Amino acid sequence: MHDLVAITALGGTTPRVDTVAGVTCTENPSVALASVAARRGQEAKAQAALAKLIDASAPDVEQHAGGTIAAFWSGPDQWMVEAPFDSHEDLALQVKSAVGDTASVTEQTDAWTRFDLAGDPLASVLELLCMLDLRKISAGSVSRCSIHHVGCFVLCRSSEAFSIYGPRSSAGSLHHAIVTAMRSAL
Amino acid sequence: MIINHPLLGPRDAAEFTYLGDASLIDRPDWQAEDAAEAFYDYAYLRDNPAGEHKELWYHEAGDRSWLVVTRDTTTHEISKVELARDVARARGRSK
């Protein structure tokens, strides 16, 4: 028998937590992801199926919505679905059975790493990291942008809570950028 | 230069990369009789207008969408921005 140890994207056995002044950056490995792309001519049906799955209408441009299973917009007729890993390890399968032939679903869980930023003032940290117009961003919005030359999704859950998804293979670089910005801004 | 993305609103041109003439959307039929000549034209022959030009831009540092940007090459004024998907479909392309 192999004796394998689960590690996080940053290589630790427990998620990394960094606090600078009033802002905390927490590595969050306990999230399952799946991408959904509506098939041509099936867009309305795919949206309806997704809405039923997340118990909210399918998110519009640069928005996210949902409860335990939530979704965020990633492109025209395209979404990323997120859910707690412990209860939804087979998320892609669940999404596929919900949308059927109306959309294509791809497992994304280990492709991304998530950092949760909490505290105040987050805007002064984020304005060093990305080119987003932070005055336009409010709870429920999501944007794809470059952070430290890494393509990321930035989700605004409230003015004091943001999640950043970046490619797992660049987790170290992204974490370095976030913590450097926190030390610089706060 | 600011590109007014049709879905995301005004975005800095630094977020985009430039591909070239929007006529690249009109890829010739490889099975046609004159395919060799059509592909020579498609790959190598370009108009080089001083004035209005339709071109393909890729929102690389954003939502990864392809855009058709109508830009005046003498002033850099951008008069129109469309999703390349919509332009291609309007021309009868399936994808």
Image (cartoon, rainbow, N blue to C red):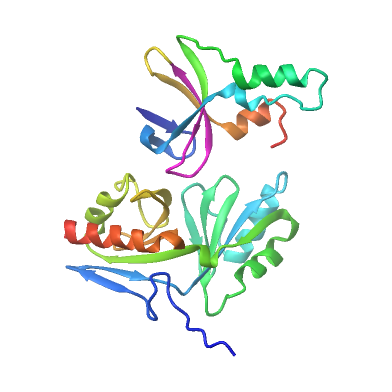
Q: Is residue B73 above or below residue A83?
A: above
Among the 4 quarters of the image, the one containing residue A35: bottom right
Q: Which residues are magenta?
A: B56-72
State left or right for residue A183 relative to residue A50.
Answer: left
Q: Position of residue A92 (x, y in %)?
A: 63, 67
Q: Is residue B71 shown in magenta?
A: yes
Nearer the observer, A111 or B5: A111
Q: Residue at x 67, y 54 (%)?
A: A46
Instruction: Give the quadrant of the N terminus of chain A.
Output: bottom right
Q: Residue at x 38, y 70 (%)?
A: A10
Nearer the observer, A2 or B60: A2
Q: Residue furthest top?
A: B50
Q: Residue at x 23, y 71 (%)?
A: A19
Instruction: Give the quadrant of the C terminus of chain A.
Output: bottom left
Q: Residue furthest bottom?
A: A1
Nearer the observer, A33 or A133: A33
Q: Residue at x 40, y 71 (%)?
A: A28
Q: Position of residue B85 (x, y in %)?
A: 61, 34
Total residue callouts: 0
Q: Is residue A90 above or below residue B26?
A: below
State left or right for residue A165 relative to residue B85.
Answer: left
Q: Is residue B81 above or below residue B34?
A: below
Among the 4 quarters of the image, the one containing residue B4: top left
Q: Is residue B58 above or below residue A38?
A: above
